[in-house]
Image (cartoon, grey):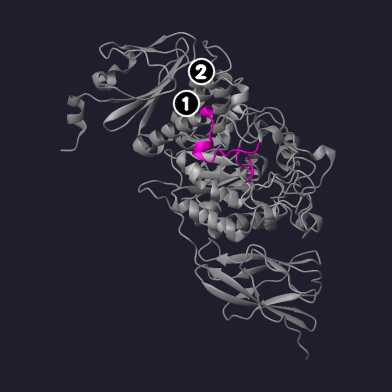
């Protein structure tokens, strides 16, 4: 019998496997490699080819088997490889199609250990972290040679707010020291995987290849190097993944493995965007189905996650990225739009394989009650089926609205008070990811009509409040655009190599940039370094807001951190009478930080009424009285 072999076995271990000649039977496998101890002894393999009709696959390595193809399409084979979960090494697969045969070396690599750096912490991120959100296409263009890539449907258009501007992985690497200088300990980048869409492909949320970095951002090797260098600098990398939908140019949508891999589209099948329909005891089943199964927009096909093959494809993809790049966490886009059954299955598997990896979902909702449904909460009987955290839009809205209006009983910063007073709904509110704006929301400085004191106060409250704060790139330069998504996602000064000045160089910064960067750096130093144990393990409290003042604090082992904001236009008294049971030594109170340049009002430590300047934000450390310290200190 005549055998036609590939010239050499495919090394199926890269991010995007090289296509062989047209004579090759298989051109690609998803996932391109795998890792040991990934929670199952069954690995779902998706083989690609220009025509796989009549093809079959077997394992030549003794002791392993592969099940029959169940794809309904001639472009794919979908098989389950049965392997020992602890196996590490290379398996030889043989694909046969008539008289043709092809061998593929498939690697099973050691699983990396993704664990917290700090002892006695549950997750890779903890409440002492501070996160920086980057939209790669708008952060920094480090490599202009990849702005235009052959085969990509959209080229660069730096004048179009919705076009590709050219930011890339090399630019992020060049900006790592800048992010580190501000004191951030974690970086979340919006999706870097391939988005080969005809327009608005810059944002990354319309994936066209789940296993590839977009070539206009760089290569897989560059991404791995970025993650490694960030870790070496003490920063944790967060990947942004989308379980709910993909781009309409995705090959798996254009040529599906099976007709039920995606929910079918019609104008009536656009989601209703109502998260509340899922927990609402009065909602109709039809409206619940439309929420979970409707398309997000007409260019983004909705995965059918009730299909077990689709669910496994998405689960394996998530695990692969974590292992491949040795990531600290996953942010999940449009989290509640996925089906609850699938989310539970995904979360159980992730916690089994990588129990310490921090997973948080985007939950854009208008009420605390509905938002809390998606986080670990006091009502849930399936905590393992929940992510570790979600994005806290309620704190975001409280700070946005609260500083745009005058203080009153339930307005102004009273909004923050009432929002946090509902934390009893959550099992672990300290892990909620908090923010004041993001890549989908008008710039906070613009919302505050460019009033610097409000922006500084909001950043101060965000940095000190419970949860893990996340700041959107450009906040430190007081970006202030509102309106379209393209407009709010501006390029940073110094984005291009030929820019007249660069915020990445300290000597080029404007006065207001120096002021905000210094402010952020000092706040992050308190949170992530000087008082990190207070944020991780301290007991929080908040005072009832009065006359424009919001105050709260954290009880540490030897002292408390007290922070206060006066949003009014007048000097106000902060009444410390309610803190008398804490037995504080007010005579030794130390002012750590204040937002205004003018001197703070003199504080009489003998008085329980501290005067706060109008529009001022303060942070103090106040030790306990010596008698109390003697009682609580170890013998």
Question: Which residue, given by chain and number where applicable, does mark 2 sit on?
Answer: 413
Residue at x 66%, y 48% (from the top left corner): 243
Q: Quadrant of residue 316?
A: bottom right
Q: Position of residue 255 (x, y in %)?
A: 81, 59
Q: Is residue 429 left or right of residue 295?
A: left
Q: Is residue 578 left or right of residue 436?
A: left
Report crowding for label 1: few under 14, some 14 to 19, many 20 or more residues within 10 A (C-alpha): many
> Residue 491 lies in magenta, yes or no?
yes
Question: Which residue, given by chain and number where applicable, does mark 1 sit on?
Answer: 461
Q: Main secondary structure of the magenta part?
A: loop
Report crowding for label 2: few under 14, some 14 to 19, many 20 or more residues within 10 A (C-alpha): many
| Quadrant housing the C terminus | top left
Image position of 500 with respect to 421: above or below: below
Q: Is residue 120 visible?
A: yes
- Tell me the mark number nearer the camera, choosing from 2 and 1: 1
Q: Position of residue 178 (x, y in %)?
A: 50, 42
Residue extent of the magenta highlight: 490-512
Whether residues under marks 2 and 1 lie with C-beta atoms below 8 angstroms apart, the answer is yes
Q: Is residue 216 visible?
A: no
- Give 288 or 54, whichever is nearer the viewer: 54
Q: Give the mark, 2 or 1, whose residue is nearer the N terminus.
A: 2
> Residue 35 lies in magenta, yes or no?
no
- Give 359 or 339, whichever is nearer the viewer: 359
């Amino acid at each position: 019998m005549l055998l036609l072999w590939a010239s050499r076995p495919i090394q199926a271990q890269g991010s995007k496997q090289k296509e062989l000649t047209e004579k090759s039977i298989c051109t690609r496998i998803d996932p391109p490699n795998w890792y040991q101890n990934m929670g199952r002894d069954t690995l779902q393999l998706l083989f690609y080819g220009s025509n796989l009709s009549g093809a079959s696959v077997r394992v030549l390595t003794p002791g392993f088997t592969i099940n029959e193809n169940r794809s309904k399409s001639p472009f794919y084979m979908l098989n389950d490889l049965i392997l020992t979960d602890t196996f590490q090494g290379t398996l030889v697969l043989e694909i046969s199609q008539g008289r043709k045969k092809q061998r593929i070396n498939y690697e099973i690599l050691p699983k990396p250990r993704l664990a917290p750096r700090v002892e006695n912490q549950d997750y890779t991120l903890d409440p002492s972290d501070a996160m920086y959100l980057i939209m790669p296409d708008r952060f920094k263009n480090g490599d202009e040679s990849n702005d235009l890539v052959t085969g990509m449907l959209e080229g660069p258009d730096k004048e179009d707010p919705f076009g590709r501007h050219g930011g890339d992985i090399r630019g992020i690497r060049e900006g790592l020291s800048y992010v580190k200088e501000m004191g951030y300990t974690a970086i979340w980048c919006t999706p870097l995987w391939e988005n080969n869409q005809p327009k608005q492909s810059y944002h990354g949320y319309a994936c066209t290849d789940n296993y590839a970095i977009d070539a206009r951002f760089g290569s897989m090797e560059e991404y791995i190097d970025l993650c490694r260098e960030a870790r070496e600098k003490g920063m944790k990398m967060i990947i942004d993944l989308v379980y709910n939908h993909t781009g309409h140019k995705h090959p798996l949508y254009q040529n599906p493995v099976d007709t039920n891999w995606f929910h079918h589209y019609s104008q009536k099948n656009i989601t209703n965007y109502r998260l509340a329909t899922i927990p609402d005891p009065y909602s109709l089943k039809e409206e619940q189905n439309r929420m979970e199964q409707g398309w997000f927009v007409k260019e983004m096909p909705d995965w059918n996650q009730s299909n077990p093959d689709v669910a496994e494809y998405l689960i394996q993809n998530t695990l692969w990225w974590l292992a491949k790049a040795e990531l600290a966490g996953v942010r999940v886009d449009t989290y509640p739009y996925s089906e609850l059954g699938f989310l539970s299955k995904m979360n159980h598997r992730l916690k089994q394989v990588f129990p310490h990896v921090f997973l948080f979902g985007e939950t854009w909702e208008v009420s605390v009650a509905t938002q809390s449904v998606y986080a670990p909460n006091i009502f849930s009987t399936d905590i393992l089926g929940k992510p570790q955290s979600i994005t806290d839009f309620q704190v975001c809205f409280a700070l946005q609205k609260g500083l745009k209006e005058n203080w009153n009983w339930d307005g102004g910063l009273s909004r923050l008070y009432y929002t946090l007073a509902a934390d009893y709904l959550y099992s672990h509110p300290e892990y909620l990811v908090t923010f004041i704006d993001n890549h989908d929301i008008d710039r906070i400085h613009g919302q505050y009509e460019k009033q610097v004191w409000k922006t500084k106060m909001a950043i101060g409250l965000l940095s000190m409040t419970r949860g893990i704060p996340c700041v959107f790139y450009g906040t430190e330069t007081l970006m202030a655009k509102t309106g379209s998504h393209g407009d709010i996602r501006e390029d940073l000064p110094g984005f291009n190599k030929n820019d007249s000045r660069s915020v990445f160089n300290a000597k080029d910064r404007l006065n207001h940039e120096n002021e905000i960067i210094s402010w952020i750096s000092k706040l992050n130093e308190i949170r992530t370094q000087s008082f990190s144990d207070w944020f991780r393990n301290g007991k929080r409290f908040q005072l009832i807001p009065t006359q424009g003042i919001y105050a709260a604090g954290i009880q540490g082992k030897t002292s408390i951190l007290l922070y206060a904001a006066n949003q009014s236009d007048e000097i106000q008294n902060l009444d410390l009478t309610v803190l008398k049971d804490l037995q504080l030594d007010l005579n030794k109170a130390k002012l750590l930080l204040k937002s205004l340049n003018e001197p703070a009002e003199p504080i009489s430590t003998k008085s329980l009424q501290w005067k706060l300047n109008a529009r001022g934000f303060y942070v103090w450390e106040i030790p306990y009285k010596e008698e109390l310290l003697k009682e609580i200190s170890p013998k």
